[in-house]
Image (tube, rainbow, N blue to C red):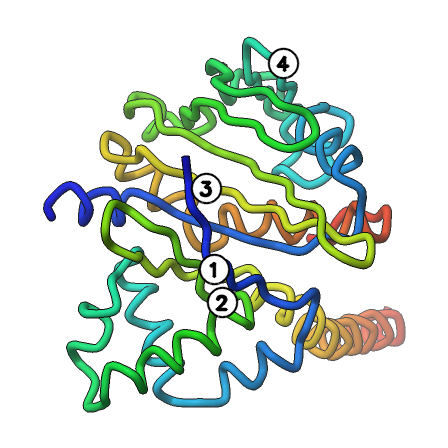
Amino acid sequence: MTIWSHIVPRVDDDDRVFKALADPTRRHLLDRLFRRDGRTLTDLESELDMTRFGVMKHLRVLEEAGLVVTRRSGREKLHFLNPVPIRLIHDRWIDKYTERRASALADLKTTLEEESS
Amino acid sequence: MTTTTQAAQTTQVYQVFIKASPEAIWEAITTPEFTRRYFYEARIEATPERYRSVGPDGSDWGDDPTFEYDPPRRLVHGWRSLYDPELADEAMSRVTWEIEPQEGGYCLLTVTHDQLEGAPKTAESVSGRGWMMVLSGLKTLLETGEPLAG
């Protein structure tokens, strides 16, 4: 039976995701999990010039934003990257603006082609 | 130590909040009328015995055993990637869906894809955009009634 972390991120909290991403150490931690998922704290702190406590604090911010999910495997606590909140921010904030630009270009093309025909 | 590391690398975890009842989420992940609107157009039917997936062209995308069927909380089933000839011969892996009610009419949906030891290409294929598109599409469908464009 899986034992999930007791930290449950707050519902649909974009602020927390943006805040969690607005820090180079936390982005570095996400990048490391992207390269290889399911790491222990000891593993994650190995490349960082920071105290264990400091790394734990950053991981907690990532967990509260829903970007990192932890689960126990035997005596170890493993950290997994959850990319879904980033996808949702992409859908909400990036698609919206790039789509308008793309459709403006498509409209321009249609107009120009109609004029020339 | 070795087993932990292996388990870690052959496990993927995805979580998403969805503003819908556990029953609505359960229906959306177990009935073909719903899955075709967010799951790469696959028509998926989950029963207490089998988890069957049919592609939009009518071909077999998956037909694997259901290990746990506990509506509307928990579904565990086998996974083989029959939709891609390159992945189809790989060993079966396992997918677990957990639906936990939260405050404010939300549920936390956790999808764990594990036991991927014998399916490295499948692991690569479903990571990143794979499960992410399914889950963001499922959320959009349940919250707005519209499938995700594109």
Sequence-earlier tag: 1 or 2: 2
Does the image show residue B36? Answer: no
Q: CA distance from mark 1 to mark 2?
A: 5 Å
- B102, above or below B64, in the image: below
The quadrant in which the C terminus of chain A is found is bottom right
- Dots 1 and 2: beta carbons under 8 Å? yes
Q: Relative to A33, is B143 on the left or the right?
A: right
Amino acid at the residue labelled 2: Leu
Question: Callout 3: few (<14), some (14-19), or many (20+) C-alpha neighbours within 10 Å?
Answer: some
In the rendering, at what x and y percent does residue A60 appear? Answer: 44, 75
- B63, above or below B90, in the image: above
**SS at mark 1 in the image:** loop
* Residue displayed at 24% across by 62% down: A40
In the rendering, at what x and y percent does residue B38 appear? Answer: 69, 41
Q: Which mark is residue B77?
A: none
Q: Which residue is mark 4?
A: B47
Q: CA distance from mark 3 to mark 4?
A: 19 Å
Q: Which mark is residue A67?
A: 2
Amino acid at the residue labelled 1: Asn
